[in-house]
Amino acid sequence: QVQLVESGGGSVQPGGSLRLSCTTSGLIVNLTTMGWYRQAPGNEREFVALIRRDGSTYFADSVKGRFTISRDNMKNTVTLQMNSLKPEDTAVYHCNRSPPLGFWGQGTQVTVSS
């Protein structure tokens, strides 16, 4: 059974940074494409970033140049480093396979506000 557990969210001021972590069981992060997604209140969940089996990455235009995605094969975790955060980055962030499985973890709340 696959489990997805996100952590690391919080409240920061614009321009700040956060580091999100995704721990999973049932998926091997270096054997599948893993992604981060987010959902702001009243909006549909949207793609943020992914990391492929070969280590290549891809980002949504809205976060390109500010976010990075990486993985730790030994710990089987995927990390999203978010820098230069903007109020529009406020959302619940989820990790999942890419394309996503048919269920989601609880996510972690990111709030960017002055």
Image: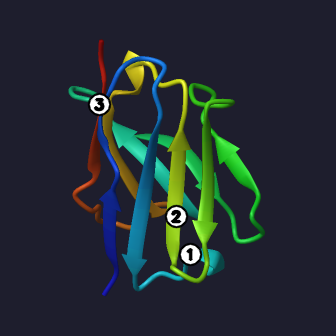
Chain-order first, disc 3 or disc 1: 1
Q: Residue 98: horizontal and vertical position, in percent?
A: 54, 61
List the residue tagged with mark 2: 78
- The label shown at residue 29 is 1
* Callout 3 touching callout 2 (CB < 8 Å): no
- The label shown at residue 9 is none
Give the position of the N terminus as an image quadrant.
bottom left
Amino acid on which disc 3 is placed: Ala
Chain-order first, disc 3 or disc 2: 3
Q: Secondary structure at mark 1?
A: helix
Q: Quadrant of residue 23?
A: bottom left
Q: Residue at x 34, y 51 (%)?
A: 8
In this view, the residue in front, 63 or 47, is: 63
Q: Quadrant of residue 4?
A: bottom left
In this rendering, position of residue 38 left or right of residue 84: left
Q: Residue at x 45, y 26 (%)?
A: 16
**Up-down relation of residue 86 to residue 66 (above or below):** above
Q: CA distance from mark 3 to mark 1?
A: 26 Å
* Callout 1 touching callout 2 (CB < 8 Å): yes
Q: Residue 60: horizontal and vertical position, in percent?
A: 60, 35
Amino acid on which disc 2 is placed: Val
Chain-order first, disc 1 or disc 2: 1
Q: Secondary structure at mark 2?
A: strand
Give the position of the C terminus as an image quadrant.
top left
Q: Residue 32: horizontal and vertical position, in percent?
A: 60, 74
**Up-down relation of residue 112 to residue 98 (above or below):** above
How would you rate the neighbour count of disc 3 (Cα within 10 Å): few for under 14, some for 14-19, many for 20 or more? some
List the residue tagged with mark 3: 40
Q: Residue 110: horizontal and vertical position, in percent?
A: 31, 36
